[in-house]
Amino acid sequence: MRGMTTSQAPVARSVSTIGVIGLGTMGAGIAEVFARNGYAVVGVEKDEEGLARGREHLEHSTARAVQREKMTEAEQAELLGRITFTTALKDLTDADLVVEAVVESLETKKAIFRELDSIVSPQTVLATNTSSLSVTEISTANSHPGRVIGVHFFNPAPVQDLVEIVRTVVTEDQVLADTKALVEALGKNPVVCGDKAGFIANTLLFGYLNHAVSMYEGRYASREDIDAAMRYGCGYPMGPLALLDLIGLDTAYEILETMYRQGRDRLHAPAPILKQMVTAGWLGRKTGRGFYTYEAPDSPVVV
Ligand code: 3HC
C-alpha cells in the first residue's frame, strides 16, 4: 500500500501504524506478521493478564525463529521493539489500520467497532479477523461501515500464506484495493470473497474436520490412524484431529455452529463430542489437552 498508485486507487492510504485488538493466538500471530514487515504495531488487550499472555506468545514465537537461525537476537529485539502494548483502545488514535481479533462474540466485536468511531480517523480502515461472524453486521456498529472489511488470517498466522479478504455490500472499492495491496506487501496471498459464514476455506475445511470427529466418536478408527490416513495418504501437513487441537476446539465449535445455523448443511452440525470436550475445558494445544495431550500449552509435542 505504501506509495501505491493505480488508476483505480489514486489516493491509496499510506499505512505505517497498525492496531491489533486482542492478543490471543491469532492476534499475537497477526501482530508478529506486521512487526516482521516493519510496521509499528499497537497491541490492545482487555487487561494486564491478557497483555502478559500476548507478549509471552510473541516472545516465544520469535525465540523459536532465533533458535532455528531464521532471525538473529538483534532482529528479534528490533521486531519486538516495534510493538507497544496497552489496555486502552484510545491508544489507537494514530492507527492507519486496525485489525480486531477478539473472541468470536458479535456483541463484543460490535462494541469495539462502535467505540473505535470516536478514536480513529475516518480514513482508518477497520478490519475484523472473524472466522465466521457476519462482517456486515459488525460494520453496522460503525458510523463509516464502508471502511469495514474482513481480513481472515490462518493459524499459525506467521506461517500460513493465505489471507481471505471479505468485502461486504458496503465496503468501499478503495478500502478493498488498499487492503489487498497491504496483504500482498506482507508477502501473503489475498483471496477475495463475499460475506457468508465460513468464507471460502472454512466452508470447505470444517465439513471435513467435523467428519473426522464423528469418525473418532464412533470408534471407527483411532485418532492416530485417522490423522495418519490424511497425512500420509493425502499429503496434508497434519491430520484433522491434530489440526483441530491447533485451531482450538472452542473456536472450531463456534465456527461449525455459526455455519450450521446459517446454512443448515448437516456436514456442519457439530459432532456431539466436540461440545463435550469444550465443556470439559479440553480446548486443544492451548489448554494442553484436546484429542491429544501436550506436555505444555502450545507445545507441539504430543504425549
Ligand atoms: N508460530 C510461528 N511459527 C511457527 C508456528 C507458530 N505457531 N508453528 C510452526 N511455525 C514455523 C516453524 O518455526 C517453522 O519455521 P521455519 O520453516 O522457518 O523453520 C515452520 O513453521 C514449520 O514448523 P515445524 O517444523 O515446527 O512443524 P511442521 O513442519 O510440522 O509445521 C505447521 C507446523 C506449520 C503448523 C504445519 O503442520 C501446518 O501447516 N499445519 C496445517 C495448519 C493449517 O491448516 N492451518 C489452517 C487452520 S484453519 C484456520 O486457521 C482458520 C481459522 O478460522 C480457524
Image (tube, rainbow, N blue to C red):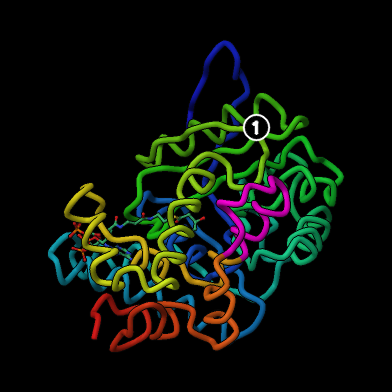
- Residue 82 within the segment the image draws in magenta: no
Q: Quadrant of residue 62?
A: bottom left
Residue at left offset 48%, top offset 59%: 210
Q: Amino acid at mark 1?
A: Val
Eyeballing the image, is 49 above or below 187? Answer: below
Q: Nearer the viewer, residue 201 or 181?
A: 201
Mark 1 residue's CB less than 8 Å from ligand 1 = no
Instruction: Report the magenta residues as a range.
Output: 254-270
Q: Left or right: where does residue 202 sit relative to residue 32?
A: right
On the image, the x and y values in percent for residue 238 come to: 27, 60
Eyeballing the image, is 186 above or below 115? Answer: above
Mark 1, residues whose alpha carbon is within 10 Å: few (<14), some, or many (≥20)?
A: many
Overall secondary structure of the magenta stretch? helix
Eyeballing the image, is 18 above or below 44? Answer: above
Ligand 1 shown in quarter: bottom left
- Residue 269 within the segment the image draws in magenta: yes
The residue indicated by pointer 1 is 175
Residue 129 visible in the displayed image: no
